[in-house]
Image (cartoon, helix red, strand yellow):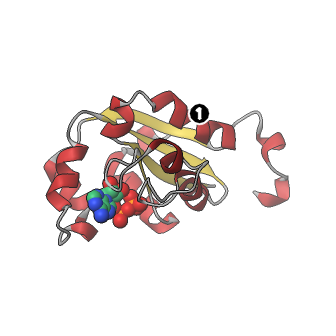
Amino acid sequence: MEKTLVILKPSCVQRALIGEVISRFEKKGLRLAGMKMIQLTDAVLNEHYAHLKDKPFFQRIKNSMRVCPVIVQCWEGIDAAKVVRSLIGITDGRGAAAGTIRGDFSMSAQENIVHASDSAESAGIELTRFFAKDEIFDYKLSTLAHLCASEEI
Ligand code: ADP
């Protein structure tokens, strides 16, 4: 099944929203396959946000991501990357739909609580960036039969 990367950003950690955000992914029916707290470095952020290197806010977003440790997570489910992106909402928290994580908890394009891979392809690259193979766990959810039809898996 598909796996995707989520980062609970310093804005999530500082505002005590860790449990709330994790709860949304759990309640949706995604399986938590890996999770750890790490301090991001400038080097890993240069890689992770390489697509933003020419933006005026590049240094600002890197500084913001290093304010305190973050929590990196691997979530698994059918179409996990797409499902997680729909749960988090669009980049700018002020414009994000109510009911999404950013729409409910963010007033900012920068301090927007979570990062999530934008596709299954990016997820593959990003999970390798933040997790060693033995930090991803392949246990079965006993509730799987109640989450979807076996034909959907
Ligand atoms: P997303 O996180 O939704 O995939 P991007 O990859 O475009 O969005 O941007 C990465 C991160 O950079 C955003 O989550 C946000 O924290 C920051 N960012 C994006 N656009 C802006 C902006 N206009 N001003 C400040 N920060 C921004």
Query: In the displayed structure, does residue 33 sit left or right of residue 129?
Result: right
Residue 132 lies, in percent from the top left, at 36, 44
Q: Is residue 147 above or below residue 14?
A: below
Residue 124 lies, in percent from the top left, at 44, 60
> Badge 1: how crowded within 10 Å, few (<14), some, or many (20+)?
few
* Screen quadrant of the C terminus: bottom right
Quadrant for residue 50, please give it.
bottom left
Residue at the image position 45 percent from the left and 47 percent from the top: 6
Q: Secondary structure at mark 1?
A: helix
Residue at the image position 68 percent from the left and 43 percent from the top: 28
Residue at the image position 79 percent from the left and 59 percent from the top: 152
Residue 103 versus residue 81: which sits nearer the camera?
103
Quick check: which quadrant has ligand 1? bottom left
Label 1 sits on residue: 23
* Screen quadrant of the N terminus: bottom right
Residue 16 versus residue 35: which sits nearer the camera?
16
Residue 88 lies, in percent from the top left, at 52, 52
Residue 17 versus residue 97: which sits nearer the camera?
97
Residue 75 versus residue 82: which sits nearer the camera?
82
Q: Is residue 125 visible?
A: no
Q: Give the residue type that dot 1 points to.
A: Ser
Q: Is residue 48 above or below residue 10?
A: below
Residue 16 lies, in percent from the top left, at 41, 27
Q: Is residue 138 above or below residue 56?
A: above
Residue at the image position 17 percent from the left and 53 percent from the top: 60
Quadrant for residue 141, please give it.
top right
The number of discs equals 1
Quadrant for residue 117, please give it.
bottom left
Query: In the displayed structure, does residue 140 sit left or right of residue 128?
Result: right
